[in-house]
Image (cartoon, rainbow, N blue to C red):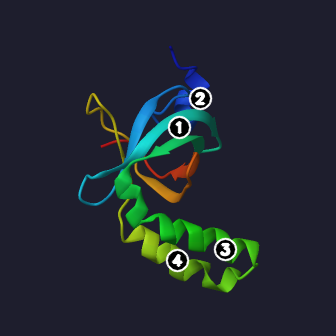
């Protein structure tokens, strides 16, 4: 599948249909991602968690709970805990990928923002 140039630019090297992995600071795979949409630097897609995801899942569950209960004053705290995992993208072919932020990974879906161009 050949990416559209506008979609490629928005995703800074990512494209719809691309297969990626969500990795933690130890380069451990937390799950497989298939990119389904890129809009204004926000990427969304399907997410298939690995068993290692269970270690960070409680943080994402807490994030959802805070949002649902409108406890927005606590979001910075949970965001910092998620940032400590230094989540990043990986690919089977080792192509450099952009940095990501504001990751929200759940049992079947994921969204994140693209921070910068690949090194």
Q: Nearer the viewer, residue 5 or 16?
A: 16
Choose mark 2 or mark 4, whichever is in front: 4
**Circle nearer the N terminus (2, 3):** 2
Q: Earlier in the sequence, mark 2 or mark 4?
A: 2
Spatial distance from mark 1 to mark 2, Cα to Cα? 6 Å
The image position of residue 68, as x and y in percent, is 74, 72
Of the 4 image quadrants, the one containing the C terminus is top left
**Residue under the point 41% across and 46% down:** 31
- The answer to whether residue 36 of the structure is visible from this angle is yes
Residue 30 point in image, percent of width and height: 38, 51
Distance from the alpha carbon under mark 4 to that under mark 1: 25 Å
Give the residue displayed 48% in from the left and 64% down from the top: 57
Q: Which residue is mark 4?
A: 78
Residue plotted at (41% across, 57% down): 53
Residue mark closest to the camera, 4 vs 3: 3
Mark 3–mark 1 distance (CA, rounded to whole Å): 29 Å
Secondary structure found at label 4: helix
Task: Please give the residue where the numbered disc 2 appears in the rendered image.
Answer: 7
Give me the disc on residue 11: 1
Q: Is residue 113 left or right of residue 87?
A: right
Decide which of tag 4 and tag 1 comes sooner along the chain: 1
Label 2–label 3 contact, CB within 8 A: no
Checking the image for residue 57, the label placed there is none
């Amino acid at each position: 599948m050949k990416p559209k140039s506008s979609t490629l630019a928005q995703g800074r090297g990512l494209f719809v249909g691309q297969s990626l992995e969500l990795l933690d600071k130890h380069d451990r795979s937390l799950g497989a991602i298939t990119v389904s949409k890129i809009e204004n630097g926000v990427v969304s897609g399907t997410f298939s968690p690995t068993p290692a995801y269970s270690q960070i899942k409680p943080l994402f569950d807490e994030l959802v709970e805070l949002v649902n209960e409108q406890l927005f004053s606590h979001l910075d705290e949970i965001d910092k805990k998620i940032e400590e995992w230094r989540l990043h993208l990986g690919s089977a072919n080792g192509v450099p990928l952009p940095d990501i932020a504001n990751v929200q990974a759940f049992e079947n879906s994921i969204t994140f923002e693209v921070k910068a161009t690949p090194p």
